[in-house]
Image (cartoon, rainbow, N blue to C red):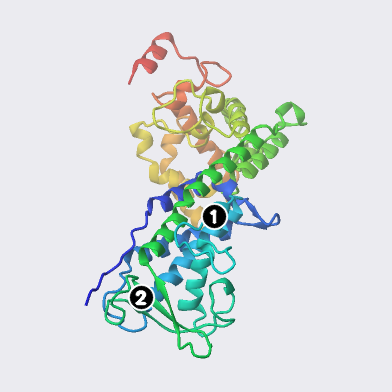
Amino acid sequence: MNKHVFQINLNTDVLHKLRNKVNEQQNISYNKTYKKKYRAWDKICAIMNRLDDTVYYLNGLKLNTGIYTRSAFDFYNFMNAASVVIDCIKELSKIFDVPNDKFKKSTEIFNQSGKDGKGTDEKYFEYLRSLCSVHPVETSRHKRYQDNDVECSPYVIWNNRRIWINDNCDIHAVVYTSKDKNINKRVQIYIPQIFKYVKTRLEFVGEIINAIDKYQKQVICDLRNTPIKKEEEFDNYVEYLRNLNKELKERFGLEVWHPFDNIINLFELRLSNPQNQHKINLYLNVLRYAISFEHNSIQNMSYKGFENNGLLYPEKNIETSLYIQLQSPYSGSDERGRYNYNLEKISYLSYDSGFDNKQLAYIQLEEACPFFEKYVSFENAKGDFECYALVKLALYLECLENNCMINKNVPNDLKYRERLLSDDEEKELFNNK
């Protein structure tokens, strides 16, 4: 007996590239529409998950191992799973408007044009799948390949040269045609052709990835060319921030990491203790300075360059901005490092985190007060958010005493600092690696 075990080897790299490309601009992918009215995100995610699971399943599937000696259930499984892969790719190409005419019209793999001469590789594969595994008791929708209006397949059997010695195909689909004096016919199937068909369809994902890239770039280009209203177009700065916050979420999604909600609250805050007013004005001024660059970043859809991030002295391999740094001021000092846990819990005061969490936040605040009170006073402070704001203010002022990104990039101007850096201090700050 001549038996050959078959196992496909599909390239899975293209699946990782697909997922990376979709997630590269996730908000753009999330807002992609399908059939001009449906959000396509759920379908895109389902397709990517199905492709991952099914391609890996196919790669692990061994055919003609001898387990199935009559009905080739391993081949049935392969055809059904392969069809899932192909259907997923077809749907993905529709979502991103990728023409697939060359596949719809190709005939070079199976070379089966059928009785009307209009058959294609795609149509022949669908005929084999219908005949072998999906509609074996009544295959009727592939007339060009059928010998009667209805065909039935009792079994598909591996050709290990036991019955048809001179037949070089790999597997036979036995077909009843319901024709008088015609017991059955045998459809010869060649596994390398099946494998090649599936591989070429999976390779088409590369073209879809290119189309997704072009789509994302076009959306970004459109957004860049859609002006965001500037500060002077609003009656007050808070209204400007609210609009900027809306633009941020529309362009980057609702789950953006650095929204302006707390900054809006900070600009609306009225301090209970006048002793802190001058200091918080410095912090608000530097935030306005940083937000002017953030406006550019949102408009240009990029953090690259001083005009977008406000950093004359950025750190290598870190994508950030002065505004992002100012939201969570970090000096890197040893003293500040001793209160990392406290600061993590104090953040509960910035939103409705629940009674227990806020109680814990105040315990941690009290413990860290000797550090914060070097810079601000908590006397007469009222409300959770005011305490939270004073902590942020203290951290900012502490940064101006240390060698850190904030101190290097905040202009040496009394509009932003309690005192100017001396020439020696500037020299030490910028020469210290």
Q: Residue at label 2?
A: 74
- Earlier residue among tags 1 and 2: 2
Mark identifier at residue 353: 1
| Residue type at the position of mark 2 | Asp
Mark 2 burial class by Cα count in 10 Å: few <14, some 14-19, many 20+: some
Q: Is residue 165 left or right of residue 227?
A: left
Dot 1: few (<14), some (14–19), or many (≥20) neighbours within 10 Å? Answer: few
Q: Quadrant of the N terminus?
A: bottom left
Judge from the rendering whether residue 292 lies leftward or rightward of residue 191; answer left or right.
right
Q: Estimate the x, y position of residue 11 in percent, counting from the top left.
A: 37, 54
Residue placed most toward the observer, 23 or 15: 15
Q: Position of residue 4 (x, y in %)?
A: 26, 70
Return the x and y of residue 51 as percentages of the image width and height.
Answer: 45, 60
Gap in angstroms between the C-alphas marked 1 and 2: 55 Å
Q: Secondary structure at mark 1?
A: loop
Instruction: Please name whichever residue, 170 or 58, is drawn nearer the observer in this view of the structure.
Output: 170
Question: How many marks can you see?
Answer: 2
Between 38 and 119, the residue placed more toward the observer is: 119
- The residue under label 1 is which amino acid type? Ser
Q: Position of residue 295 (x, y in %)?
A: 62, 31
Closest to the camera, between mark 1 and mark 2, is: 2
Quadrant of residue 241 in the image? Answer: top right
Residue at image point 51% right, 72% down: 127
Residue at 53% from the left image edge and 28% from the top image edge: 309
